[in-house]
Amino acid sequence: MPLARPIRLLPIFLIAAGLFQAPALAQDQQAAEEAAPRVSVELNRLESRNEGCRVWMRVGNPGPAVDPLRLDLVVFGKDSVVNRRLALDLGPLPAEKTMVRIFDLAGTPCDGLGYILLNDVLACGPDAPPACLARLSVSSRAQGVALEK
């Protein structure tokens, strides 16, 4: 009969051991995400055209190749009202490379843009979109138009 008591306590010890390991595993995962190279997305230039606004995006990838990289963007007007939503394909991004991607906002004049919101990541290589969103840094050089996350 003396063996029965330790066997019943075994599940409690296993659960307790798991509780102590869970924070360590979460910290390891967070440290790995923070150590991963940050992909920078910069709204670099707006170019007025007869058809609308041409948008120049500079994408810096200091780490391994990312393919695909597809972003969900929402364009707001000066009045902070949604103008349009679009999926922008920035990939493939070669390893340790900076690239420029261009897209047109037909029917939208550049002087009517308020800001662009990086709403979500739709696809990001082998990573899950939420993990990739955390690795993206955004900025803007376009006069009067911010790129936000």
Image (cartoon, rainbow, N blue to C red):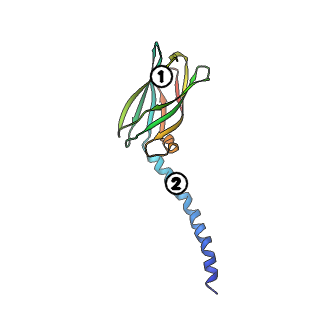
The residue type indicated by label 2 comes to Gln
Query: Across the whole image, how many numbered discs are drawn on residues?
Result: 2
Q: Position of residue 11 (x, y in %)?
A: 61, 72
Q: Amino acid at mark 1?
A: Ala
Task: Tell me if mark 2 has few (under 14), some (14-19) or many (20+) residues whose alpha carbon lies within 10 angstroms of its own.
Answer: few
- The answer to which of 34 and 43 lies nearer the viewer is 43
Is residue 75 rendered to the left or right of residue 89? right
Residue drawn 61% across the image and 79% down it: 6
Residue 114 drawn at (x, y percent) = 56, 22
The local secondary structure at tag 2 comes to helix
- Residue at position x 60%, y 67% from top? 16
Disc 1: which residue: 142
Q: Which residue is mark 2?
A: 27
Q: Quadrant of the C terminus?
A: top right
Q: Nearer the viewer, residue 85 or 81?
A: 85
**From the image, which quarter does the N terminus lie in?**
bottom right
- The local crowd at label 1, few if under 14, some if 14 to 19, many if 20 or more residues have their Cα within 10 Å, is some
Residue 87, image x, y percentages:
50, 31
Residue 79, label in figure: none
Q: Give the image location of residue 55, x and y in percent.
A: 45, 23
At 41% from the left edge and 35% from the top edge, which residue is drawn? 91
Q: Residue furthest top?
A: 50
Q: Are marks 1 and 2 in contact (CB under 8 Å)?
A: no
Disc 1 element: loop
Task: Calculate the distance from the C-alpha at mark 1 to the C-alpha at mark 2.
Answer: 37 Å
Give whichever of discs 1 and 2 has the lower sequence position.
Answer: 2
Left/right of residue 44 with respect to residue 1 in the rendered view: left
Q: Residue at the bottom extreme?
A: 1
123 shown above or below 3: above
Is the residue 126 above or below the residue 17 in the image? above
